[in-house]
Amino acid sequence: MDVMKHESESNTEMTVVARCCFGWLTLVAEILLAGSLGLILYWVFNYHGGVAFAGDGSRQMNLHYVLMVAGFTFMNGHAMLVYRMFPCCKKIYNKIIHMLFFLASAACIAIGLYAAIDAHNEGPKPVHFYSMHSWIGLAACGLFALQFVTGFFFFLVLMLCDSATAKFRQTMIPTHVTFGLIIFVVAAAATLTGLTQSARYRLSGKDGKPNYKDFPEQGIVVNVLAMCIIASVIIVPYIIRNSTYGRYTTLTIN
């Protein structure tokens, strides 16, 4: 009897510890995601004149930077975390919030991609999609679009036949989650190569520009932004995939 009581108390203690760890990790993830968005906004508006939708190639590229970080990192990160952050809510409410974040992410990515293409068209000999950054970015956009279409069909359209498709949708959840994490990582790679490409151009030390090698303030801002994105790529998948959180990581369809 005493042994059973001891085991029960131990399990309860582990549950409390797991929930405390989950809370702290979620807080860190929120700081990293919000910090990434805040840092790119600070870099663009404090050092490079803000954003523009048309008529100014440099500021259009600024818009591209902001929207891609907002879409692929901030919005997409929250779209994945929403199921872990509100475990007490009904799944349907989590689905709605997840979908809204995903739609906001898609809008940011689409507008950001257009801004970059239009900005490059202003040059005398426009060239598109030649760099490593652009290739990785296109891969991330393609995977994101595929995830959006399949997720919409499997988890929303098929809900019209709820009882008949429940088992099939249940089997698709691990694949959907895994591809979401893959997209998050690929998008981070695109962001980091894009930041490197931009920093080498804007901090070249030529024509009055700061020199990256001299550790200018904005160079440090870019580096800290990169570290935030790398850390979020570590922590967000860890939260999603860590099985020690029990209830928080149970993949259910209802």
Image: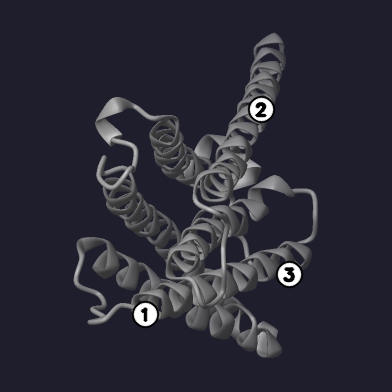
Residue closer to the observer: 143 or 109: 109
Q: In this view, does 127 lie to the left or right of 153?
A: left
Which residue is situated farthest in the top direction here?
Answer: 2
Question: Which one is earlier in the sequence, the residue at label 1 or at label 3?
Answer: 3
State yes or no: discs 2 and 3 in contact (Cβ < 8 Å): no
Q: In this view, does 119 lie to the left or right of 10?
A: left
Q: Residue at x 53, y 34 (%)?
A: 244
**Figure quadrant of residue 223:** top left
Q: Residue at x 46, y 39 (%)?
A: 225
Residue closer to the observer: 31 or 3: 31
Reading the image, the residue beneath label 3 is 96
Q: Position of residue 217 (x, y in %)?
A: 44, 30
The answer for how far apart the CA atoms under marks 2 and 3 are is 28 Å
Residue type at mark 3? Ile
Residue closer to the observer: 53 or 149: 53
State yes or no: discs 1 and 2 in contact (Cβ < 8 Å): no
Q: Quadrant of the C terminus?
A: bottom right
Relative to 19, say whether 200 is above or below.
below
Q: In which quarter of the image is the N terminus?
A: top right
Q: Residue 211, labelled with which disc? A: none
Q: Residue 15, labelled with which disc? A: 2
Q: Residue at x 47, y 74 (%)?
A: 115
Which dot, 2 or 3, sits closer to the camera? 3
Which dot, 1 or 2, sits closer to the camera? 1
Within-10-Å neighbours for mark 2: few <14, some 14–19, many 20+: some
Within-10-Å neighbours for mark 1: few <14, some 14–19, many 20+: few
Residue type at mark 1? Glu
Reading the image, the residue beneath label 1 is 122
SS category of the residue bearing label 1: loop
Relative to 238, say whether 41 is above or below.
below
The answer for how far apart the CA atoms under marks 1 and 3 are is 40 Å
